[in-house]
């Protein structure tokens, strides 16, 4: 049995939470990088979880900008604003609540290519009130300093229903982009590039149970990919970042623990990994006060709120271990 709303204090911190968005309390899909001065930057989808009138249906999940937070140590975070459109692309602003938008921004992936920063951002026209029937595309942006981003081009990928980009350079020196392809029953599709300029699609990387939010990284002599199954994260292992084997069988996940809504401990969702020497930090989000109801249609805004958490990953006997 879950606790009723009277037992929930959404103004209090959830157990273990690292960061909450101060505008709409809807920080999701976090990605974290460090700049050349050692400063920590978090980019995330700023869902409109507590907006007073976001629109019907799932409009509250759309109409989002990319929120930005800053930190000196990766633990204490301060809101820095949102990436707002300008004549060139996107610029960081913090001069009040974001305006109503005509393009939804989701799930930023931010990498450094050795020369400059690149962002792979999901864009959706308008503010859809339903899930189906709306094209999604992944668009590349570039930046020298993480504050301003020039818009380059949409990428030609597996379909016009792709979201949640993850990009990494594999052991063969080639770049790979993984994404959720909703036109293929929500599995992870892959594209390959030699130079980050031209991409070719390369089939399905992770099939099986529907999922989203792929993220690939190297740790302990293996490549690993995490995918969000909405009940925890599946773990996949590879020697070459091309062929993947699931860890623990079809039902195994990490961060699958959940408890009563009032306890504030819920399953881990869509995140990213930042390497710190031999340590791997997994930044992910949860809905701390979700009661198990259909979240997308929830009328009670407390269930929509989200919080960013961090866990440590390590490899033991060729298995990926997650410590919440």
Image (cartoon, helix red, strand yellow):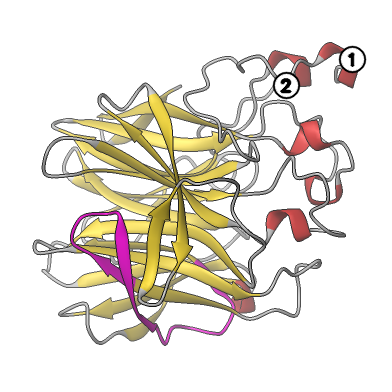
Mark 2 surroundings: few (<14), some (14-19) or many (≥20) residues within 10 A: some
Secondary structure at numbered mark 1: helix
Q: Where residue 307 sits: x, y (%)?
A: 57, 31
Q: Looking at this view, is 321 or 277 the one in front? A: 277
Task: Determine whether 307 is above or below 16 in the image.
Answer: below
The magenta stretch spans residue 162: yes
Q: Where residue 114 sits: x, y (%)?
A: 9, 61
Per the image, the residue denoted by label 2 is 10
Task: Determine whether 134 is above or below 228 in the image.
Answer: below
Q: Looking at this view, is 274 or 254 the one in front? A: 274
Left or right: residue 223 versus residue 263 is left
Number of numbered discs overlaid on the protein picture: 2
Q: Where residue 90 sits: x, y (%)?
A: 40, 66
Q: Quadrant of residue 10?
A: top right
Q: Which mark is residue 6?
A: 1
Q: Which residues are magenta?
A: 141-163
Q: Gap in Å between the C-alphas at discs 2 and 1?
A: 10 Å
Q: Looking at this view, is 314 or 157 the one in front? A: 157
Q: Where residue 313 sits: x, y (%)?
A: 33, 30
**Residue 19 visible:** yes
Residue at 37% x, 58% y: name it.
109
Secondary structure at numbered mark 2: loop
Q: Quadrant of residue 239?
A: bottom left
Mark 1 surroundings: few (<14), some (14-19) or many (≥20) residues within 10 A: few
Residue at 58% x, 14% y: name it.
15
**Residue 1 visible:** no
Residue at 53% x, 72% y: name it.
123
Residue at 63% x, 79% y: name it.
183
Left or right: residue 282 versus residue 230 is left
């Amino acid at each position: 049995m879950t606790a009723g709303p009277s037992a929930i204090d959404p103004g209090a911190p959830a157990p273990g939470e690292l960061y909450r968005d101060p505008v709409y309390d809807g920080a999701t899909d976090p990605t974290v990088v460090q700049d050349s001065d050692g400063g920590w930057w978090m980019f995330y989808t700023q869902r409109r979880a507590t907006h007073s009138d976001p629109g019907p249906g799932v409009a509250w999940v759309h109409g989002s900008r990319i929120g930005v937070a800053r930190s000196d140590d990766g633990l204490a975070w301060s809101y820095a604003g949102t990436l707002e459109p300008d004549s060139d692309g996107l610029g960081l602003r913090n001069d009040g609540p974001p305006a109503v938008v005509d393009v939804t921004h989701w799930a930023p992936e931010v990498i450094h290519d050795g020369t400059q920063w690149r962002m792979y951002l999901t864009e959706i026209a308008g503010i859809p009130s339903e899930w189906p029937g709306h094209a999604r595309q992944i668009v590349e942006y570039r930046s020298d300093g993480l504050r301003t981003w020039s818009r380059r081009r949409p990428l030609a990928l597996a379909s016009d229903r792709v979201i949640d980009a993850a990009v990494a350079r594999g052991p063969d020196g080639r770049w790979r982009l993984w994404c959720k392809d909703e036109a293929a029953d929500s599995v992870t599709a892959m594209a390959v590039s030699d130079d980050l300029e031209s991409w070719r699609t390369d089939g399905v990387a992770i099939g099986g149970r529907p999922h989203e939010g792929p993220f690939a990284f190297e740790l302990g002599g293996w490549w690993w990919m995490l995918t969000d199954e909405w009940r925890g994260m599946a773990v996949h292992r590879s020697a070459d970042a091309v062929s993947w084997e699931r860890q623990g069988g079809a039902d195994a996940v990490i961060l699958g623990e959940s408890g009563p809504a009032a306890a504030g401990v819920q399953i881990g969702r869509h995140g990213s990994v930042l390497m710190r020497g031999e340590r791997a930090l997994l930044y992910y989000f949860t809905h701390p006060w979700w009661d198990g109801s259909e979240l997308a249609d929830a009328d009670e805004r407390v269930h929509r709120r989200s919080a960013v958490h961090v866990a440590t990953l390590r490899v033991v006997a060729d298995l990926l271990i997650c410590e919440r």
